[in-house]
Amino acid sequence: MTAIHRFVEQARRGELARVVTRVGSGWVVLGDPQILPGYCLLYPDPVVTDLNGLVGDARRTFLADMGRVGDAILAETAAERVNYEILGNVEAALHAHIIPRYAWEPPERRRQPVWLHDWTEARPFDPLGDADLARRLAVRLTAPHGASPTGP
């Protein structure tokens, strides 16, 4: 049982405060800590070991959902790009990191993977402070594909 398994179980029970929304492949959650504003993860439901554990439509859905989360982050933050990472080296369960990158980051940090940043200085997830962004992301992610959540 990995942390990813526990998080998915908590999300199913409505007990994971970081949940943004349920999507076709699993759960979108805000990262803790928020190494950069809007950092999200996508957890598959059901949990599988790695991307190769998904086949056919399940794999396509997971990867499409990952891209949709990135689209939502770009639309709802001042990010200039999004980095996508699927590692699984610490937790042997599929999960995707969806990491916004910003023009205001120091130049030396902008060239580095986020894993080289000082995570001890990152702002912890804040259920109240992050609620508005989570709500806006959820609206975008639950709008019909191709539709704007704010109108035509």
Image (tube, rainbow, N blue to C red):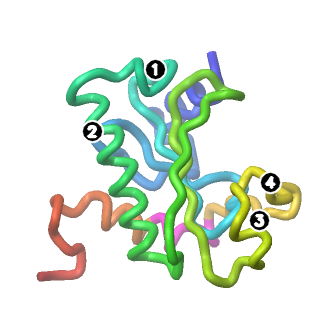
Q: Which residue is mark 2?
A: 61
Residues shaded magenta? 128-134
Q: Which residue is mark 1?
A: 48
On the rendered image, what quadrant is the N terminus found in?
Answer: top right
Dot 2 surroundings within 10 Å: few (below 14), some, or many (20 or more)?
some
Q: Which residue is mark 3?
A: 123
Please name which of the two marks, 2 or 4, marks the residue nearer to the observer. 4
Amino acid under disc 2: Thr
Q: Name the residue: 40% across, 57% down.
A: 69
Please name which of the two marks, 1 or 3, marks the residue nearer to the observer. 1
Amino acid under disc 3: Arg
- Spatial CA distance of label 3 from label 4 is 16 Å
Snapshot quadrant of residue 76: bottom left
Residue furthest to the left in view is 152
- Secondary-structure class at tag 3: loop
First in sequence, mark 1 or 3: give its number: 1
Q: Which residue is mark 4?
A: 116
- List x then y, in percent, for residue 45: 40, 29
Amino acid under disc 4: Leu
* Nearest the eye: 136 or 78: 78
